[in-house]
Amino acid sequence: MTAPQPETSSAVRTTCPYCGVGCGVLATPDGQGGAAIAGDPVHPANFGRLCSKGSALGETLSLENRLLHPSLDGARVSWEAALGAVAGGLRRAAETHGPDAIAFYLSGQLLTEDYYVANKLAKGFIGTPHVDTNSRLCMSSAVAAHRRAFGSDTVPGCYEDLDEADLVVLVGSNAAWCHPILFRRMVDARTRRGTKLVVIDPRRTQTAEEADLFLGLKAGSDTALFSGLLVHLAEAGALDDLFIAEHTAGFEAALDRARAIAPTPAAAAAATGLPEAEIGRFYDLFTRTRRVVTAFSQGANQSAQGTDKGNAIINCHLATGRIGEPGLGPFSLTGQPNAMGGREVGGLANMLAAHMHFAPEEVDRVRRFWGAPRIITGEGMKAVALFEAIERGRIRALWVMGTNPLVSMPRADAIRASLAKLDLYVVSEAVSDSDTARARGRRTVLLPALAWGEKDGTVTNSERRISRQKSFLKAPGEARPDWAVLSDVARRLGHAESFAYRSAAAVFREHAALSGFENNGTRDFDIGALSDIGDAAYADNPPVQWPLPRRGPSAAKGRQRLFADGRFYTFDQRARFVAVQPPALAQGTSAEYPLILNTGRVRDHWHTMTRTGKSPRLSAHRAVPFVEIHPDDAGPLGIADGAVAAVETAQGSVELEAIVTDGVRPGTLFMPMHWSDMNASKARVGAVVRGVPDPVSGQPELKATPARARALAHRSRGFLLTRGPAAAPAGWWWARATIQGGSALQFATQDGSREVALTMRGLFQGLELAEYADHARGRYRCAVYEAGRLVACLSLAPAEAKPDWEAAKALFAQDQPEGPARLALLSGRVAAEAAGPTVCACHGVGLDVIAGVIAAGAGSVEAVGAACRAGTNCGSCIPEIRKLLPGTLAKSAA
Ligand SMILES: Nc1nc2c(c(=O)[nH]1)N[C@H]1C(S)=C(S)[C@@H](COP(=O)(O)OP(=O)(O)OC[C@H]3O[C@@H](n4cnc5c(=O)[nH]c(N)nc54)[C@H](O)[C@@H]3O)O[C@H]1N2
Ligand SMILES: Nc1nc2c(c(=O)[nH]1)N[C@H]1C(S)=C(S)[C@@H](COP(=O)(O)OP(=O)(O)OC[C@H]3O[C@@H](n4cnc5c(=O)[nH]c(N)nc54)[C@H](O)[C@@H]3O)O[C@H]1N2
Ligand code: SF4
Ligand SMILES: [Mo]
């Protein structure tokens, strides 16, 4: 008899929970709550590769900071009591104020099954239209642009198009950091077939450093650039007249408008702030190259004119008939792992379900399918309006699921204050300490959700590919899948029959059936072929691309590209050109707020850091919240590189470490969105961002808030490393990061070395303190031992001589450092070889080491890898390594 295989012996095929690339992951559980992580070699998104975030998934699985039990107003309660409080609160809100006093705020990180049930419950059975999602902040302008152009929210192409393009234009996308595995496909295409890369971004990002042509345009001026391109295509005789005549409408009006915005390359140059010669090169490349993919992301979407940016891009593709064929097309890069799934189920306030909206026959169809007499008949409020309605007392019950709006929503301080007006505030979360989970309404219910590795369901990536996320870990504490919790609440509200799901597979079947219901090719989203997938087939379902109808040419096998036949989902099957509005630049800047604050992402953190913040590897690349500022602005303001500066807007203020760089345009600032009140004294992006919504999509402008900056004077700077997270004394500026073997605070303070020495002695009373002090020079270092074990260490210096922490971090990784290491901690001198700031997160290789091997003769990325392993695993740091090589330095300076 053979013993059953232990759980640890086989790898589970699942999908990375981070970005919309949707890489396949092989997770091999270790039987102790952890897992070994590898790329899935057969997944068509990544063919075995993973970026730094995906590779470090194993470091984020620990249960510390997890929400493990339901709670009511801060006290642990049973599921029974929590669900009773939710159902009771929803019922009361509906009875007293009407069902539309209830709102749901969902997330592109929910699985399709969770999303489907939430949407059905709210729109079909509770009868509130106010269901929106963080995808409003992410994809909604792309959705609106698709619908205006194609009549449907369809991404026409696929990843293979990036392999097969001769020109890839990236608009407002830092793909090297945000879609790293797709970016590697683009770079590979360059090596293989000479694909050219154009990057359009007001900031010289890591992606821009890799480009053949970088267009550092003025923030918000993209519509002028692409209007100028449309005019140029017309003048150069590069239009596809047949395609325009047979498959589109509205060309003349769009071209007239483009002529009004940017009649000549010179006009486009003036509007965008770019040299005319660069514009000429771009227009020329685009005109000459048939196989062009124009991929756009948040620099396009997160804009007060985001929908027009999308349509200005799509106009150029329609005008040249460059859509629906291999190697070309407009391509919206989705951000979250299931941004697409959310759109499929209809999670946005302006959708109903399964890519249906609110035409009477659509409402009727969904009503019949769901058996939902109370179904809503029109759009609800979009995120910005929805949260404003809470401030006005219009929304009385809010259920937040899988998102952290107190960090990620614009005007987040105002939102935080308004939550107190809610009669019911429900948060479904995987962690207990997110800013949103720690906030309070009049009645607050926290519901613990299963996290990645525990939950089970499907996600859809940027190329419409549906993949499985599978559970390979035990459900911790009392955490449950969101779809099951929603179904329980539905039952308590009297809808047991319609929510009698026994598994995620059952939910998926219903979702698939709705997509195919009375479809007959009239709706793009159709996965009817999966509507009776069995439990076993669902469990093993390989990644498939929709559409996947029961009948027709792509029946049951999926389709890579749409629109090859030139037929679109408008009533006359013609695509639409859109006459876009002229760009309105630097809106709202004034003498008081003369700068423009741009926001975005760093390579190794994911959003509000509730997961990546747990990984020492991922926390090493960028460990403090920062603001990038141009030397021309920093100089007069007295802001020095590395010092702490305040960034203030009409909405609020943050305090960040300044990086003085000509990578941002003069007059602009850039700060990352990741830090929250969990891990920094004052660095929540949402506190300062204004978020004017795009008039078409309702997506808020997150890349251009009027702002000012100011130097903040501190007496001392330092770091404190501890085994567990330490709290900084009140009044200090600080940021916390996870390090190997503990937690680190970087701080700035008005205290001098004497005061800090006293603080340390107070904090670590009774333990052995080894100290070095030079109070005359404001320096103090201290190592704290408990029975020989190093438990804390601190280094303090005058603010302008901020101590470097790399060496101390390396020593702290040892539990019981020996003599020389103990001395090094105090002397501040590095005993071991200096590594410098981490560049390669996978192998922990620092800048100094890489610079060293380059100085010693390593002349290529490959040679650097051979010499010190940097860049040899996930490759996310290759752009940074390339920048250190002598040849590229010259190129980027040009
Ligand atoms: N490492 C990492 N990767 C991620 C995420 C993460 O949190 N961390 N999040 C995922 C999610 S949800 C998303 S939505 C994607 C986002 O992926 P991206 O859109 O690539 O990332 P962002 O940094 O938000 O913004 C991209 C760029 O837009 C530029 N930009 C600002 N204003 C303008 C403008 O007016 N015009 C143009 N052309 N560009 C402009 C910014 O300078 C920035 O470099 O990343 C996904 N991947
Ligand atoms: N200023 C500025 N603001 C931005 C952006 C920007 O570029 N600039 N980008 C915007 C964009 S594109 C996005 S996508 C958003 C992202 O912003 P958020 O969605 O607010 O950020 P996350 O940190 O991803 O929050 C997801 C939360 O869901 C929890 N979670 C994870 N899995 C599950 C689950 O299965 N169930 C439940 N119930 N919870 C779960 C996580 O613990 C985490 O707290 O931010 C937006 N805000
Ligand atoms: S590119 Fe990185 S973060 Fe995105 S899905 Fe792949 S491994 Fe995950
Ligand atoms: Mo996003």
Image: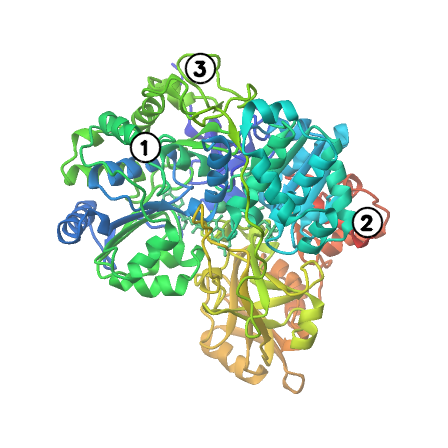
Query: Which residue sits at x=47%, y=71%?
Result: 728
User: What residue is pinned by disc 2?
Assistant: 891
* Local SS, label 3: loop
Can you identify the residue that label 3 sits on?
Answer: 556
Q: Are marks 1 and 2 in contact (CB under 8 Å)?
A: no
Which amino acid type is shown beneath numbered disc 1? Ala
Q: Is residue 650 above or below residue 177?
A: below
277 left or right, relative to 816: right
Q: Is residue 43 visible?
A: no
Rendered location of residue 160, percent (x, y): 62, 26
Q: Residues within 10 Å of mark 3 (few under 14, many from 20)?
A: some
User: Which residue is pictured at 46% across the width and 57% down the height?
Assistant: 692
Viewer-closest of 554 and 761: 554
Category of crowding for the residue at label 1, using alpha-carbon neighbours closer than 10 angstroms: few (below 14), some (14–19), many (at least 20): few
Of the image marks 1 and 2, the number of the one nearer the N terminus: 1
- Is residue 662 visible from the viewing direction of this image? yes
